[in-house]
Image (spheres, rainbow, N blue to C red):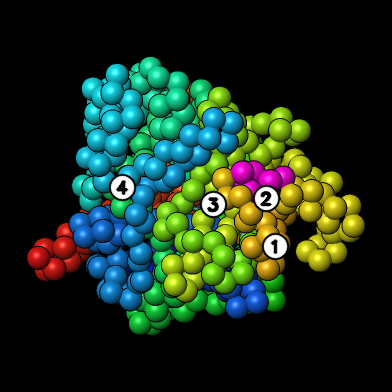
Amino acid sequence: MEVVIIGAGMGGLFCGALLAKRGVRVTVLEKNASIGGGLQTFTRNGETYETGMHVAGGFNEGGILNSICRYLGIMDRLRIRESDLMLSVTYTDSGRTYDLPAGREAFIRYLSGLFPHEAENIKRYVDAVFRLSHEEKLFYLESISGIQDHTDEFFMPADEFIARYISDPELRAVLASVNPLYSGIPGHSPAYIHVMISALFMENPCWFEGGSGQLADALRSVIEQGGGKVLTRCEVTQVRVSDLNVECVVDKEGNEYRADWYISDIHPLTLIPMIEGKAFTTGYKSRLESIPDTASAFKVYVRLKPGTVRFPGHPVSIVDSRENAWKMAEYDLKDWPHGVNCFFGEGRGGYASHLTAYCLMDFAEVKEWENTRSGHRGESYEVWKRERTDRVMDLVEKRFPGIKDCAQEVFASSPLTFRDWFGAKNAGAYGFFKDAANIAGSQIPIRTKVRNLLLTGQNVNMHGIGGVPMTAIETIQTIFADDFVLNGIKQAISDKK
Ligand SMILES: Cc1cc2nc3c(=O)[nH]c(=O)nc-3n(C[C@H](O)[C@H](O)[C@H](O)COP(=O)(O)OP(=O)(O)OC[C@H]3O[C@@H](n4cnc5c(N)ncnc54)[C@H](O)[C@@H]3O)c2cc1C
């Protein structure tokens, strides 16, 4: 069997590696010069920065990512560093900081000490987080054949889920502090995404030492060992379909690629215009077009003077006030940003080498320059970008006084940069928005009407390290209709024991 995969993001590469492990010959086609999509790292003036993978989870012994990577034979190649805290959250108006510990019991103990009147509720909340996360069967390597039952709580809005257990407004805000990691909108973001992310990072917050590009490289090597290839600078522009079967995909240079199955890891709205003829109904297309994207991203990269800023060893969230805990993805322009997530690179002697300050941003902010090319967007764009960079750094300075003077170099990437990197129109940081108020409408199946064309990646199910690899397993299971991969992973775990 042969499979062609469009896009060498985390989804395409996990699919490719899982197929290669099964003896399938895979060809992955990637438009960029480097592979990885959100796993890409880039180096500027000797400093390596992440594009879309700052915090990871599940790489601990027995964790889901550890198990999958062990099955693929790449776990020992990965340099994973555990974070000493899940997250440190500061509210700049009150000056209060919460250092949320890693580990379920430590998390409960810490918050119960600060909010003794909520101690019982905190335990019930954390129990509910893990109980709901177990409803996502693949996450615990349970077979998903048959119907998956879910409780009402699973699909309720995340803010209502928190409020169901917790009364204290400050504690509600603290527990919501992971919401920028899923572009949270109150009343809409579903509890299942909140619990999956909270459980993953509460159990094993970690990062890739030297950058997450190493995961992309390791997955590529599995594909190549299986006789497959990953082609870069290979932009797919056409998908030829005949009689509801893909005949071949065609790249920008006119090269054709043929296979038995085709998997698309790119945004479905990037894929649709490439498909010729009437393969997809107007109804299907307009349904996809009606799903909003998550907010996009604005990131400030700061190369720090050596020996000036201590390396915290954990992510730091800075929020202007607890009342704005849910105003990262939707906000008044004049108040942007209400919050910023800071990720530090480790330098020498306990000091940080760089800072990446990450804020969510509406793509509408850059609409007027959407038809420009990188490096040629004009002076008005540069002025706008500098002003937004200053706003971000002003907020960072409130938590780390003097940090601006420690900068050797400061530059930024806007939603336009992310659009060009990942090839998605509105550059939603986490793909399609999943809406608790319209769960059926925001979920798209792996299967398409075209018999040998499947979808994978962050737009299906869930984004990030806790979602995309699981969707890759489901995508492979859709081809073979068996539990081969799951059984292989379980076998790899028992062999290790
Ligand atoms: C700023 C930011 C920070 C993030 N931080 C985290 C984090 O800390 N932890 C976490 O777990 N997740 C994080 N995420 C989310 C995570 O990066 C994504 O969910 C994940 O990388 C998505 O993988 P994917 O394979 O679905 O898509 P992508 O990574 O977008 O991959 C799609 C690939 O397809 C390629 N492509 C597009 N069009 C074509 C074409 N026509 N032909 C060929 N190739 C094409 C693209 O170049 C890209 O390589 C973050 C995302 C962003 C934007």
> What percent of the width, then of the height, locates residue 198?
36, 40
Q: Are marks 2 and 3 in contact (CB under 8 Å)?
A: no
Q: Are marks 1 and 2 in contact (CB under 8 Å)?
A: yes
Disc number at residue 410? Answer: 1
- Disc 2 designates what residue? 393
Look at the image and say whether residue 393 sits in the magenta stretch: yes
Q: Earlier in the sequence, mark 1 or mark 3?
A: 3
Q: Nearer the viewer, residue 368 or 244?
A: 368
Amino acid type at circle 2 is: Met
Q: Quadrant of residue 167?
A: top left
Look at the image and say whether residue 287 sits in the magenta stretch: no
- Disc 3 designates what residue? 342
> What percent of the width, then of the height, locates residue 23?
30, 74
- Disc 4 designates what residue? 102
Q: Earlier in the sequence, mark 1 or mark 2?
A: 2
Residues at marks 4 and 2, CA–CA distance in whole angstroms = 27 Å
Q: Earlier in the sequence, mark 3 or mark 4?
A: 4
Q: Earlier in the sequence, mark 2 or mark 3?
A: 3
Crowd around label 2: few <14 · some 14–19 · many ≥20 (10 Å): some
Residues at marks 1 and 2, CA–CA distance in whole angstroms = 10 Å
Q: Nearer the viewer, mark 4 or mark 2?
A: 2
Q: Split into 4 quadrants, where in the image is the C terminus? A: bottom left
Question: In the displayed structure, does residue 168 sit left or right of residue 318?
Answer: left
Magenta-drawn stretch, dominant element (helix, strand or loop)? helix
Residues at marks 1 and 3, CA–CA distance in whole angstroms = 14 Å
Q: Are marks 1 and 3 in contact (CB under 8 Å)?
A: no
| Residue 38 seen in the figure | no
The boundaries of the magenta stretch are: 391-398
Quadrant for ligand 1 reads bottom right
**Image point 62% across, 56% down: which residue?**
403
User: Callout 2: helix, strand or loop?
Assistant: helix
**Image point 85% across, 64% down: which residue?**
376
